[in-house]
Amino acid sequence: MAWEQDILGTEFQSLAFRAAGADGVERTATLVRHRPKGVVASPPGSRQAVLFLHGWSDYFFNVDLARFWSGAGYDFYALDMHNHGRSLRPGTHGGYVGHLADYDAEIAAATALIGDHGTPGPLTLMGHSTGGLVAALWASRHPGAVSRLVLNSPWLEMHGSSLVRRAAAGMLAPLTRVRPETVLRLPERGFYWRTISSAAEGEWTLDDRYRPPLAFPVRAGWLSAVLAGQAQVARGLGIEVPILVLLSGGSANGLLWSEEMRRTDAVLDVRIIGARALTLGRSVTVERIDGALHDVFLSPDAVRRDAYARLERWLASYGHDTAPDQTSDAP
């Protein structure tokens, strides 16, 4: 395996690798790293690092986010998980995963690569949307592996309440058992894409091969996996490290376009996400950002500057530590 120049330009490199899950299946994932011009790379494990996990039907493209973390003194990495972005392969279902724990092996492999096959230095795990759910579950299953958790609009619960989740899980269970890859015929909404893509009314250059405007097809097994993960969150994860949850100040989730979607989360119900965040662990900070989009760091300039300022303020309190105990359960 060798690092190659990434699609994002000379400041970025990427490395595709394969990791075998607990089920024995090998899956392709891609690790991206930021190497600012003129900055000498630090020895593996010698300083703090951050690993970013994207949302569903998404990939890593936010160069400003990488530059923020590098400027804060972190080695920045992002993982395009299997069946997403740079890791898409012919003949596979885009965005599909049958169990969220299927991501565990590639996340563990990424942390090993960050530490050059040894224990990485203090690691911050960051996740957006479904990637935020995956990050929280992974941190819970691997105590000692991360020093802090940063969640950007994590998909911790379904719209409405846990009753909606349980009802949906019950209806999906028979289909998931026999035909998990069945496509569910759900309304297609490209409203959030409209607010961020420069091909519509946003300011971000997105590759439609990696992030289609209407997202990948929703499959029964994938949705069941998400619901099962949310049920674990509802029972409480007991994460011991400090957690920051960043959310928009409001939601606009209708089936028809609304101008309010330019200033709110058009994907999730931030009210219930904020409440559910308190079940993650014992040290949880929730920041509500007025005017923010679903990805708070893709919001209009003044709003995302507010989001970065809140993240910077939190890191001033929780962002400095030493390497994890070498006897911990870290992979």
Image: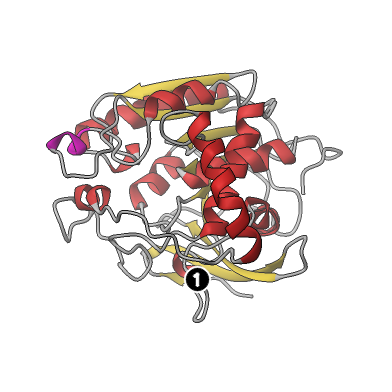
Q: Quadrant of residue 159?
A: top left
Across and down, in percent, residue 108 comes to 70, 54
Q: Callout 1: helix, strand or loop? A: loop
Looking at the image, residue 147 sits to the left or right of residue 168; the answer is right
| Residue placed most toward the observer, 147 or 102 | 102
| Residue placed most toward the observer, 153 or 204 | 153
Find disc 1 in the rendering and name its residue: 93
Please state the extent of the stretch shown in magenta in the rendering. Answer: 259-263
Across and down, in percent, residue 307 comes to 34, 30
Q: Is residue 262 magenta?
A: yes
Residue found at x 15% / y 57% = 200
Looking at the image, residue 300 sits to the left or right of residue 70; the answer is left
Q: Quadrant of residue 65?
A: top left
Looking at the image, residue 280 sits to the left or right of residue 168; the answer is right
Residue found at x 67% / y 30% = 237
Figure check: 32 above or below 159: below
Q: Is residue 249 magenta?
A: no
Is residue 84 something one can see in this rendering? yes
Residue found at x 52% / y 30% = 163
Color encoding of the figure: secondary structure
Q: Quadrant of residue 143?
A: top right
Residue found at x 68% / y 53% = 104
Across and down, in percent, residue 95 comes to 48, 62
Figure check: 311 above or below 138: above
